[in-house]
Amino acid sequence: MKSLKEYILDAEAKKVAIGHFNISNLEALWGIFNAAKKLNVPVIIGASEGERDFIGVQQVAALVKSIREEYDYPIFLNADHTYSFERVKEVIDAGYDAVIYDGAKGGIEDNIKVTKQCVDYAREYTKRTGHEVLVEAELGYIGQSSKILDELPEGVTTSGEGLTTPEQAKEFVERTGVDLFAPAVGNIHGMMRVGHDPRLDIPRVKKIREAAGVPLVLHGGSGTVDEDFVDAIKAGISIVHINTEIRVAFRKGLELSLQEHPDEIAPYKYLKDAMKAVEEVTGKRLALFNHD
Ligand SMILES: [Zn+2]
C-alpha cells in the first residue's frame, strides 16, 4: 500500500482532496469507513486530544490499523490539534500516521521552535521504525471548537489582516520543515448556526501553496459552501477537515433512533442509525472532494 504522503501527492496531482473526519467512538469510525469504501477513496480519521482521550490514545490507533489491515484499505490516522510536544511524542510513539502541532496560542518564535522539535522527533522515529509519520502545522487563528456557532469565535477574522500571508507560510515551512501546512484563508473551526460559513479567499490559497512548497490542509470545513471547496481544492488544498457536521449527524441520528424506538435498550441496535447518519454526511463530502 502507498504511504499517506503518496496518497496526498496523488490527490494533489488529480486536483482532488482527501477527506479528514473526526471520531469520538467506533460507530463513527465505521460510518466514515463505509462511506469511503463505497467510493473507493482514501480517507483520514482525525482524533483531537479530547476525542482520543475518550477512545484511548492507543486504542484508536489499533482500531484504524485493524481496518487498514483487514480490508487492505488506505485509511489513516491523524492526531488532530495537539498542544504540546509531549502529546505529539505520545501519538508518534503510538504509531499514528500524522500529527498536528498547534502552537497558535503562543508567540510565533515559540511556535516555530516547538514545531521544529516535533518534526525532528518524527524524522528520528521514521528512521528508527520505518513507519512514516507526517507533521502538520497551522498558522493563523481560526477558532478552536468544532461546534455550532452563533457568531464568529473571538479573535477570528475572515478577511484581510489575520489571514495567513504567503510570506508567513514560506518562512514557517522553511524554518520548521513541516510536511503539511494549514493556513487561515477565511475558514473557521465549527460552523455557523444560520446560513453558511464565511467565504474562502481562493487566490490566497493558490499563492500560499506556491510559497509554502508543501501540500495544504483546510481546517474547519464544516459549513463551507460546496463551490468554495471545489475552488479551494483546485487552488491547492489536498486535505479537508470535517468535524462539526459529523457530530451533528451522529447526534441527530441517535435522537431520531431513540424517538422511534423508545424501548430499545440494545446499543448495537439504537446506535446503528447514528452510524448511518455519519456515513451519509461523509459520503456526500467525499463525493464533493473527489469530484474531478
Ligand atoms: Zn482544525
Image (cartoon, grey):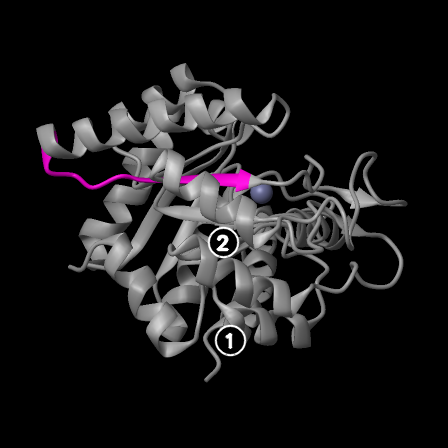
Dot label at residue 278 = none
Q: Position of residue 265 (x, y in %)?
A: 61, 38
Judging by the rendered image, the residue that carries numbered circle 2 is 217
85 relative to 188 in the view: left or right: left
Residue type at mark 1? Lys
Where disc 2 sits, the SS reads strand
Neighbour tally class for label 2: few under 14, some 14-19, many 20 plus, Cα within 10 Å: many
For this orientation, the residue located farthest to the top is 86
Where disc 1 sits, the SS reads helix
For this orientation, the residue located farthest to the bottom is 292
208 relative to 203 in the view: left or right: left
Q: Identify the residue at horizontal 32%, vertical 25% (top origin).
A: 58
Q: Position of residue 37 (x, y in %)?
A: 36, 67
The quadrant of the rendered image in which ligand 1 is seen is top right
Q: Position of residue 95 (x, y in %)?
A: 25, 32
The answer to if 132 sits in the magenta stretch is yes
Q: Is residue 196 visible?
A: yes
Magenta segment: 129-138
State whether residue 201 is above or below residue 79: below
State whether residue 46 is above or below residue 109: below
| Quadrant in the picture for residue 6 | bottom left
State whether residue 278 is above or below residue 86: below
Q: Identify the residue at horizontal 69%, vertical 49% (top origin).
A: 163
State whether residue 48 is above or below residue 181: above
Quadrant holding the N terminus? bottom left
The answer to if 213 sits in the magenta stretch is no
Q: Is residue 26 visible?
A: no
Q: Position of residue 42 (x, y in %)?
A: 34, 63
Judging by the rendered image, the residue that carries numbered circle 1 is 234
273 relative to 163 in the view: left or right: left
Residue type at mark 2? Val
Q: Identify the residue at horizontal 83%, vertical 44% (top origin).
A: 149
